[in-house]
Amino acid sequence: MIKEYTKEEIICLLSDEKNETSLLKQADAVRHQYVGDEVHLRGLIEFSNICRNNCQYCGLQRDNKILPRYHMEEDELLQTAQNAVNMGFKTLVLQSGEDMYYTQARMCRIIEQIKKNDVALTLSIGERDYTDYKAFYEAGADRYLIRIETTDQNLYHQLDPGMNWQRRHECLLMLKEIGYELGSGIMVGLPNQTLDSIADDLLYLQKIEVDMAGIGPFIPHPQTPLKNANGNNLHLALRTMAMMRLMLPDINIPATTAMESLHPRGRIMALQGGANVVMPNVTEGEYRRLYELYPNKACVDDTPLHCRTCIGMKITAIGRTIGQGYGGHKK
Ligand code: SAM
């Protein structure tokens, strides 16, 4: 389902700080009408912070030599997944830097093991080739999450040196063609990013008909070249997310951890402004702190059980219910 907005209308709504409350209210009403009051929980496992890329905004960039690196071994990852299944999660998300230790064969083994449980499985492990994506899908992965980050190709090439925007775009098309439920998204508040380009981003996500769109504020990381950049624009991120709900009324939209990291009620504000998904972190121990995309990441000192209980209470306190199914995109 698509609702048409012109680029001018989108820019106008994004720039209208005074009417943010009414934009979020409108998105909340659309969310209620199209996807109901259930909030779907996804158990997020951050299984490796090793990355071959050097994205200028990201704390996991390979030039960040201060960050201690880890990857879980297969049995550890499977145990973490099992613990999340035992806690009742119906979707698990495996996320990592681009760590090639996780070969096609290794990933397929992991996927097959996890899929013996009654869960939907999302991968978020970056750019791979067609044969890998196809093999992961055939092994049982259901969804794939890869943000386009920005559709401003000049900006993308500045921020992601050595990477290629067209290649990332092609990854999205391949994933869709293979049959995955497709998640993508952007960061908001990047240096030199304009409202014009955010409007293009929204139109792009609408055009490729994503099943899920994650929109998060850019948060400068002190160990990256963008350490002194502005960012932290929670309100623009919320307006962008609300706009996405108006443009794609029936997709899944997460209340992102980056929003929660900027405000203790960030995810609740998002859930009341168009979002219908939360991804509690089920990574255990020290790894939570080491998966440092940006500073002051929410919930790094908590346990998986604490996160699950805490978000459950917050969701019910605003009159919403926790989804009991897989929470896929209902078209
Ligand atoms: N490597 C995979 C990929 O490229 O899709 C998944 C992991 S990647 C670290 C997850 C997301 O974190 C990125 O898509 C990016 O949008 C977000 N991210 C990275 N650095 C960030 C920052 N400083 N502020 C906000 N979000 C950030």
Image (tube, rainbow, N blue to C red):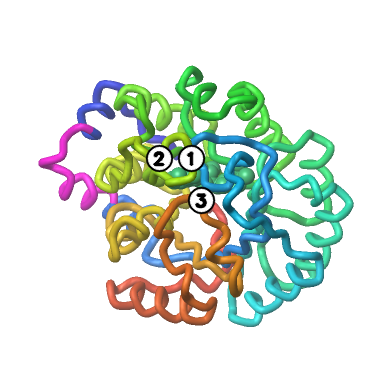
In this view, the residue in front, 151 or 164, is 164
Task: Tell me the crowding category of disc 3: few under 14, some 14 to 19, or many 20 or more residues within 10 angstroms, Cα based.
Answer: many
Q: Which residue is mark 3?
A: 293
Choose between 313 and 176: the one closer to the eye. 313
User: How much space separates mark 1 and mark 2, taking CA atoms?
Assistant: 5 Å
Residue 238 locus on image (x, y percent) = 30, 47
Magenta part, dominant SS: helix
Mark 1 touching mark 2, by CB under 8 A?
A: yes
Q: Where is residue 194? Give x, y as percent.
A: 32, 25
Q: Secondary structure at mark 1?
A: loop
Camera-nearest label, 3 or 1: 1
The amino acid type of the residue labelled 1 equals Thr
- Quadrant of residue 161 within the rendered picture: top right
Residue designated by label 2 = 227
Residue 74 circle label? none
Left or right, 29 with respect to 61, comes to left
Q: Which residue lies under the disc numbered 1?
A: 224
Read off the magenta span: 15-27
Q: Residue furthest left?
A: 18
Decide if residue 9 is on the left or right side of residue 52: left
Q: Kindly tell me whether mark 1's CB lies below 8 Å from ligand 1.
A: yes
Instruction: Out of 48 and 259, give the one closest to the viewer.
Output: 48
- Three-letter code for the amino acid on which mark 3 is drawn: Leu
Position of residue 28 in the picture relative to residue 313 (left or right): left
